[in-house]
Image (cartoon, helix red, strand yellow):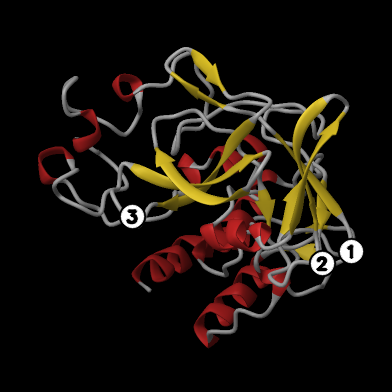
């Protein structure tokens, strides 16, 4: 509530900015008056205070929650003087109970069968080498990197000088999907990966690339290529398996994070070392 009160104070200055007309259902037009202005901010505030999280239009950033982050997105839209550039990334509705929409290709790819980029968990740029020594959120020295965590740590035995922040999900600025594709996109939650794992999956090939073809409850499909994974300078298991990150820290040791693993015989959620390079398949909560 303190952050909300502060934001309300700062937002008073926005009254000086003119509103701009929008097309129907434009992101940020929460109250449906075809404009994005202070009225939409007030509408989100009312929804937050009432505890009503069932208004899809108020989830402006598409992260599945209605909170101060959605107000910040509306502020950005107002200050920019216009609507954001339409999202060019395609997604598929699998008819999942949560309504989650999955991207049709990996972050860094332009087609479903392309591998795209690899990211260490909590990092937003690909790199040549993936190791404990160059992982962003490990400190310490060569013999105890993974027990010198500097962010996302729930156990002081793993934290740098006893550091604990009890963060169990990635902040937006550490989310490779959010940073590379924009605020409508996030790396999936563990629950979203579990939900996807409950769908029918079949090992197959698409344009000569091995992977799993997932069929949703409504019959629509999603292809996940066998991207393998990266450690040090090496690409491992490409074509025979692969891993896709979630945004959720493992409930076990905090040097692990949850992910989706796939292979020719089985696929589903698991967890693995944070410093490894995995692919990212982004999700969005609702359709614009």
The kind of secondary structure element at disc 3 is: loop
Using the image, determine if residue 11 lies above or below residue 248.
below
Query: Which of labels 3 and 1 is toward the front?
Result: 3
Q: Which residue is mark 2?
A: 217
Gap in angstroms between the C-alphas marked 1 and 2: 29 Å
Q: Earlier in the sequence, mark 1 or mark 2?
A: 1
257 and 282: which one is in front? 257
Quadrant location of residue 44? bottom right
- Distance from the alpha carbon under mark 3 to that under mark 1: 37 Å
SS for dot 1: loop
- Quick one: label 3 or label 1, which is nearer the N terminus? 1
Q: Is residue 7 left or right of residue 157?
A: right
Residue 31 position within the rendered picture, expressed as x and y whole percent measured from the top left: 75, 75
Q: Is residue 202 left or right of residue 108?
A: right
Distance from Cα at disc 3 to Cα at disc 2: 33 Å
Tell which of 36 and 202 is nearer to you: 202
Dot 1 alpha-carbon crowd within 10 angstroms: few under 14, some 14 to 19, many 20 or more? few
- Please report the residue visible at 62 percent of the width from the left and 42 percent of the height from the top: 262
Q: Quadrant of the C terminus?
A: bottom right
Disc 3 to disc 2: CB gap under 8 Å: no
- The residue that disc 1 covers is 24
Give the residue at x 61% y 55%: 73
User: Which quarter of the figure has residue 159?
Assistant: top left
Q: At which x and y percent is residue 162?
A: 11, 45
Residue found at the very far front of the displayed protein: 265
SS of the residue at dot 2?
loop
Residue in front for this viewpoint, 55 or 34: 55
Q: Which residue is mark 3?
A: 167
Of the image marks 3 and 2, the number of the one nearer the N terminus: 3
Q: Looking at the picture, how far across and down is residue 83, in whole percent?
A: 77, 49
């Amino acid at each position: 509530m303190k952050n909300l009160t502060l934001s309300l104070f700062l937002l008073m200055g926005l009254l000086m900015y003119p509103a701009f007309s929008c097309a129907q259902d434009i992101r940020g037009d929460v109250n449906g008056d075809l404009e994005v202005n202070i009225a939409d901010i007030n509408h989100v505030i009312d929804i937050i205070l009432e505890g009503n999280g069932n208004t899809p239009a108020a989830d402006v950033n598409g992260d599945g929650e209605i909170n101060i982050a959605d107000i910040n997105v509306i502020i950005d839209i107002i200050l920019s003087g216009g609507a954001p550039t339409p999202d060019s990334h395609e997604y598929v509705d699998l008819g999942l109970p949560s309504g989650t929409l999955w991207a049709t290709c990996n972050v860094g790819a332009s087609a479903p069968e392309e591998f795209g980029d690899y990211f260490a968990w909590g990092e937003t740029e690909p790199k040549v080498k993936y190791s404990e020594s160059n992982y962003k959120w490990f400190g310490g020295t060569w013999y105890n990197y993974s027990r010198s965590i500097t962010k996302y740590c729930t156990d002081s035995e793993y934290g740098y000088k006893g550091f604990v922040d009890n963060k169990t999900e990635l902040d937006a600025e550490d989310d490779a999907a959010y940073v590379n594709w924009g605020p409508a996109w996030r790396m999936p939650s563990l629950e979203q990966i579990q939900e996807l794992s409950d769908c029918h999956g079949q090992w197959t090939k698409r344009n000569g690339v091995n992977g799993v073809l997932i069929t949703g409850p409504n019959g629509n499909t999603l292809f996940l290529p066998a991207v393998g994974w990266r450690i040090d300078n090496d690409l491992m298991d490409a074509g025979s398996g692969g891993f896709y990150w979630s945004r959720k820290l493992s409930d076990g040791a905090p040097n692990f994070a949850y992910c989706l693993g796939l292979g020719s015989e089985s696929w589903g959620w698991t967890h693995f070392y944070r410093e490894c390079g995995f692919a990212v398949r982004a999700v969005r909560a609702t359709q614009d």
